[in-house]
Structures are given as C-alpha cells and as structure tokens.
Image: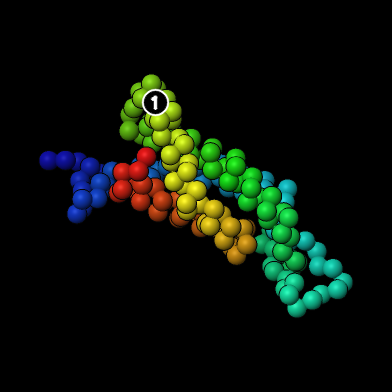
Amino acid sequence: MKPACMQTFDGVDLSSILRFIVYTVLTTPPNYRWQEFLEQTFPTTTEEEEDKSVKDKPVQDAVTGTGGKLNIANTAAKFILDQALGAPVNTLMFICLMGQMNLQSFNNILSSVISDFWPMLFAGYRVWPIVCLLNLVVVPFDYRQLVGSIAGLGWGVFLSLNQIK
C-alpha cells in the first residue's frame, strides 16, 4: 500500500501536486520581493497632469493608494525585465527545486538544467507574457503575487499532468 501522499486520484499523482504547492510556497517570497522592486523602480501609475482627457482614465495605485495615469513606459520596462530576467530565474529555480524535491543527484539536476531549461522557458513564454501583462495593468500590486502564484501553481500542475519538462 502506498503512503497517502503517493496515491493517485484518477491518474493524478498527488505527490507531484504537493511538490508544486511546496515549490509555490518557497518561491513566493523572493518573487514578491522581485515584484516589489519592479514596482518601486518603475511605478505603474504616475501623478495626473493638469490636463485630463477622457482617454487617459486614472487608475488606482495600490502601492501609494493614490490615483494616477497608467505609465506605459514603466509598465513596458517591468514587463521586459520580468520576462527577460524573472522568467529565466524562475525556470532555473523550478528545475533545481523540483529536482531536489524528487531527491535527484546534483548531476541529474545539472543534466535537467542543460536539457530542459530552454524548452521549458520557451513553453512558458506561451503563457507567462499574458499573465504578466494582465497582472501589471489590471491587478493591484498587493494582489499580483497571489495571481502570479495561482497561475504558477496551475502551470506547474499542467506541466506535471502533460509531462512537459
């Protein structure tokens, strides 16, 4: 008889889902700090100018609690930095932490990094840019990590169920 954490439910490996939950718990704090750095460096909104037009609708800034105009340049900078730096770091963390949780040797983890990093990163680029953009434009800062973590958990379960590594 398998331990409860190793049993499956209609073909779903519950131990894999548990590993994704642990991974999400471990990576949420550094990802929050990353998003906080991006927001402080490139604020989503800037102070409204005297001349308000209908098309420049103010948005609420979750960090300062003040309204302001969406700063497209800052949003683009955050998006590019998150996809160019954040995505590769998260992909590397995913491969390494999952390897450790699967009790793989250092050489096996290194082999996984070499063979799986680029395919996994490019597979993620089919999903994460839209999640990132919606998170930056629609979701208030205080909820971005929650939305990103839920999307990450779903993505991890999807990868596990479809055996995409």
Identify the residue at image location x=28%, y=43%. Answer: 15
Q: Which of the 4 image quarters holds residue 87?
A: top right
Give left or right: position of 159 versus 35. left
Query: Residue 143: image x %, image y %?
Result: 56, 59
Identify the residue under disc 1.
111
Secondary structure beneath label 1:
helix
Query: Residue 70: image x %, image y %?
Result: 72, 64
Identify the residue at image location x=45%, y=35%. Answer: 117
Q: Quadrant of the N terminus?
A: top left
In the rendered image, is residue 18 in sight?
no
Above or below: residue 140 compared with residue 50: above
Q: Amino acid at mark 1?
A: Ser
Query: Residue 129: image x %, image y %?
Result: 54, 53
Above or below: residue 152 compared with residue 56: above
Identify the residue at image location x=38%, y=21%. Answer: 107
In the rendered image, is residue 112 in sight?
yes
Give left or right: position of 30 versus 16. right
Above or below: residue 68 compared with residue 95: below
- Colour style of the rendered protein structure: rainbow
Give left or right: position of 29 versus 1. right
Identify the residue at image location x=67%, y=53%. Answer: 76
Q: Quadrant of the C terminus?
A: top left
Residue count near mark 1 (Cα–Cα under 10 Å), binned few <14, some 14–19, many ≥20: few
Residue furthest out toward the bottom: 54
Residue furthest out toward the right: 50
